Image: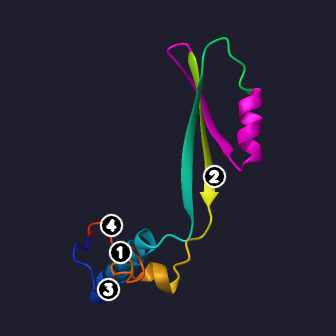
Amino acid sequence: MRFLKTDEERGDRIQALEDRMERDANPSRRWEYHVLRVGPKARAEHQLNELGAKGWQLVQAIETDGHLAFYLERELPPFEETAEEARPDELDETAPDTFGP
């Protein structure tokens, strides 16, 4: 029975961890979530159809305390950083001075 890993196995594990950290820091896909709650006698078709037309997808529906909760998700557009957005800490000299006279 072998307990110690070879240098190659340790290197592969470190590389996999670094790859996962990079992927988590810069995901290729981003999502947003919405919960629609309706009463026990309410009909949700109209609201669900409106949300579906806006790109929301139903992920799960559960009943809790006599109410229905519909969990929806939709993919956010890719985040593309422009040159101006990349440097938000720079001062805009053309902006009005809100603190001065």
Q: Nearer the viewer, residue 50 or 88?
A: 88
Residue 46 among those drawn in magenta = yes
Question: Residue at position x 77%, y 29% from top?
Answer: 46
Q: Earlier in the sequence, mark 2 or mark 3?
A: 3
First in sequence: mark 1 vs mark 4: 1
Mark found first going from the N terminus, 1 or 3: 3
In the picture of the structure, the residue carrying the numbered disc 4 is 98
Marks 1 and 4 close (CB-CB < 8 Å): no
Give the residue type that dot 1 points to.
Leu
Inspect the image, locate mark 3, and give the three-letter code of the amino acid beneath it: Gly
Determine crowd level at label 1: few under 14, some 14-19, many 20+ residues with C-alpha closer than 10 A: few
Mark earlier in primary sequence (2, 1): 1
- Which residue is label 2 attached to? 74
Which mark is first along the chain, 4 or 2? 2
Q: Residues within 10 Å of mark 2 (few under 14, many from 20)?
A: some
Q: Quadrant of residue 70?
A: top right
Alpha carbon distance from label 2 to label 3 = 37 Å
Q: Position of residue 90 (x, y in %)?
A: 34, 83
Name the front one of labels 2 and 4.
4
Q: Is residue 47 left or right of residue 40?
A: right
The CA distance from mark 2 to mark 1 is 28 Å
